[in-house]
Image: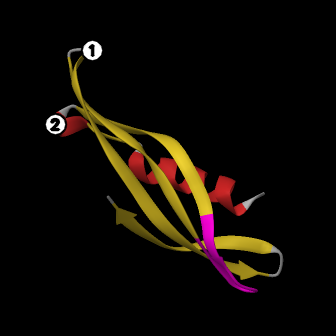
């Protein structure tokens, strides 16, 4: 799996959530991912996207708040597999 695809998947996990007590839902549409540093045992990938926050009341979606978002993900390599080490959220 390419590092960009791996980073996109993890970024979706970070920005997609539900908060039932406040009836809030978050999702992301990823617009770009690129490797900014790649070494023999580590790599850094920047992911950019658009986050959508919605308040869901009684099954009806309220107005959405859409903002640009991003993350810098650091991966570490063990044998031939990449493992997520750190996520730094960015604007």
Camera-side residue of 74 and 78? 74
Q: Tell me which residue sits at (71%, 71%) in the image.
A: 82
Residue 46 position in % (x across, y down): 52, 63
Q: Please tell me which of labels 1 and 2 falls first in the chain.
A: 2
Residue 14 position in % (x across, y down): 43, 54
Left or right: 54 as drawn, with respect to 17: left
Q: Any mark on residue 22, and which?
A: 2
Left or right: 34 as drawn, with respect to 81: left
Magenta range is 35-44
Q: Are marks 1 and 2 in contact (CB under 8 Å)?
A: no
Judge whether 15 appears above or below 90 on screen.
above
- Where is residue 64, by image quadrant? top left
Camera-side residue of 21 and 50? 50
Majority secondary structure in the magenta region? strand
Q: Tell me which residue sits at (32%, 58%) in the image.
A: 91
| Residue that carries the numbered disc 1 in the rendered image | 59
Residue 69 position in % (x across, y down): 36, 51
Category of crowding for the residue at label 1, using alpha-carbon neighbours closer than 10 angstroms: few (below 14), some (14–19), many (at least 20): few
Kind of element beneath mark 2 = helix
Left or right: 58 as drawn, with respect to 44: left
Kind of element beneath mark 1 = loop
Q: Any mark on residue 42, and which?
A: none
């Amino acid at each position: 799996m390419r590092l960009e695809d791996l980073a996109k998947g993890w970024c979706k996990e970070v920005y997609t959530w539900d908060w039932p007590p406040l009836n809030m839902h978050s999702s992301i549409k990823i617009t770009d991912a690129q490797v900014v540093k790649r070494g023999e045992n580590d790599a850094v990938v920047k992911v950019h996207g658009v986050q959508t926050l919605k308040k869901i009341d009684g099954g009806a979606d309220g107005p959405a708040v859409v903002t640009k978002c991003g993350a810098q993900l650091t991966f570490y390599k063990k044998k031939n597999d990449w493992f997520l080490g750190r996520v730094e959220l960015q604007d």
